[in-house]
Image (spheres, helix red, strand yellow):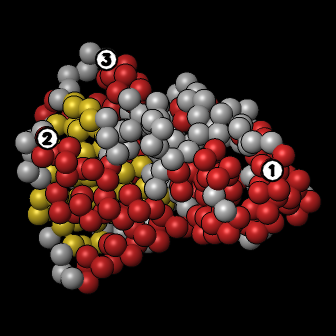
């Protein structure tokens, strides 16, 4: 399984890395961005990789191989960047890179229910081994009330048929617990399949996105890391953030504009950087990616 890092060169170039820098890769994933930085700078920089999925460490170490590197892994979500750096006795860093997309490993290998194309347990948690305290998509669809389910599908998935889907979910779970991705896909298709005929998008796309965002508190965690991460940056440090849907991009844009208006930062690119035609051909999953860059002043 090869994960192709999206906007790899543009996002790394945007960090303006120098010898001796400390860089946080807050979404280690398949290790593609980190490995590219190590190829360019070897052990002249320190990279701290964060990921809730413990397997991200071994995937990255395999990529690195014998290449000289100063790489440290923390099994943590990026919203805890301040705690990670405190534990490492690091006061501040020179660069922060976030790739907010879900990795190929999560979609195709993890077996946690992220993809509506595979029949898997309906978990959708980024953790490899969730505890009983961790929220899952299965818990949401089987226990939350109809109004709350509809609200997250509409709010996080921008699904205009959210009420129809939520109603069908609640009706279906009365007969049988919703346990797998295919259980949920059938419910969604029964609810709105006809409305999606002739469209390129699968009827389950937006609902699955919404459940994943809700399960992992993705938007609130993004707001948290934008605030904490900026505080952890040195003056002259850079943030490089790749988003994949309008909700994320809106949050990043709003945060960056707010920092600029306070005179704390400079927005490097007024319009988001998007993949080139060549990248789109080689990696169609990059089509919705947007990169925003910020410098702390």
**Considering the image in quadrants, where does the N terminus appear?**
top right
**Considering the image in quadrants, where does the C terminus appear?**
bottom left
Q: Badge 1, how many Cα within 10 Å: few under 14, some, many 20+?
A: few
Circle 2: element type: helix
Which mark is nearer the camera, 3 or 1?
1
Kindly report the distance in space between the C-alpha atoms of the residues bearing marks 2 and 1.
Answer: 47 Å
Residue 171 visible from this viewpoint:
yes
Q: Position of residue 148 (x, y in %)?
A: 63, 66
Dot label at residue 174:
1
Circle 1: element type: helix
Kindly report the distance in space between the C-alpha atoms of the residues bearing marks 3 and 2.
Answer: 26 Å
The image quarter containing residue 294 is bottom left
Which mark is nearer the camera, 2 or 1?
1
Kindly report the distance in space between the C-alpha atoms of the residues bearing marks 3 and 1.
Answer: 52 Å
Residue drawn at point x = 48 percent, y = 50 percent:
216
Q: Which residue is mark 2?
A: 87
CB within 8 Å, label 2 to label 1:
no
Q: Badge 2, how many Cα within 10 Å: few under 14, some, many 20+?
A: few
**Disc with the residue nearer the chain's start (2 vs 1):** 2
**Disc with the residue nearer the chain's start (3 vs 1):** 3
Find the residue positioned furthest to the front. 174
Q: Is residue 143 above or below residue 60?
A: below
Q: Which residue is mark 3?
A: 65
CB within 8 Å, label 3 to label 2:
no
Q: Badge 3, how many Cα within 10 Å: few under 14, some, many 20+?
A: few
CB within 8 Å, label 3 to label 1:
no
In the image, taking residue 128 as reference, residue 176 lies left or right, namely right
Q: Say which of 32 and 177 sits in front.
A: 177
**Disc with the residue nearer the chain's start (3 vs 2):** 3
Q: Is residue 179 above or below residue 216?
A: above
Q: Position of residue 49 (x, y in %)?
A: 29, 38
The image quarter containing residue 151 is bottom right
């Amino acid at each position: 399984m090869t994960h192709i890092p999206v906007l790899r060169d543009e996002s790394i170039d945007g960090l303006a890395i120098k010898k001796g820098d400390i860089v946080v890769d807050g979404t280690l994933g398949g290790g593609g961005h980190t490995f590219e930085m190590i190829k360019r700078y070897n052990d002249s920089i320190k990279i701290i990789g964060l990921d809730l999925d413990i397997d991200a460490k071994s995937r990255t170490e395999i990529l690195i191989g014998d290449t000289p590197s100063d790489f440290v892994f923390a099994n943590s979500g990026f919203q805890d960047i301040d705690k990670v750096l405190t534990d490492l006795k690091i006061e501040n860093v020179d660069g922060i890179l976030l790739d907010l997309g879900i990795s190929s490993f999560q979609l195709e290998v993890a077996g946690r229910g992220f993809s509506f194309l595979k029949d898997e347990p309906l978990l959708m948690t980024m953790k490899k081994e969730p505890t009983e305290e961790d929220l899952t998509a299965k818990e949401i669809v089987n226990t939350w009330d109809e109004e709350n389910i509809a609200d997250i599908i509409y709010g996080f998935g921008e699904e205009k048929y959210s009420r129809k889907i939520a109603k069908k979910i609640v009706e279906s779970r009365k007969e049988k617990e919703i346990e797998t991705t295919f259980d949920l896909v059938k419910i969604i298709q029964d609810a709105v399949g006809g409305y999606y005929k002739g469209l390129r998008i699968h009827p389950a796309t937006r609902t699955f996105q919404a459940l994943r965002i809700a399960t992992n508190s993705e938007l609130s965690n993004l707001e948290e890391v934008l605030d904490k991460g900026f505080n952890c940056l040195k003056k002259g440090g850079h943030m490089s953030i790749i988003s994949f849907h309008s909700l994320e991009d809106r949050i990043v844009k709003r945060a960056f504009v707010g920092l600029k208006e306070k005179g704390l930062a400079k927005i490097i690119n007024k319009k988001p950087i998007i993949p080139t035609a060549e990248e789109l051909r080689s990696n169609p999953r990059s089509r919705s990616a947007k990169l925003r860059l910020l410098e702390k002043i």
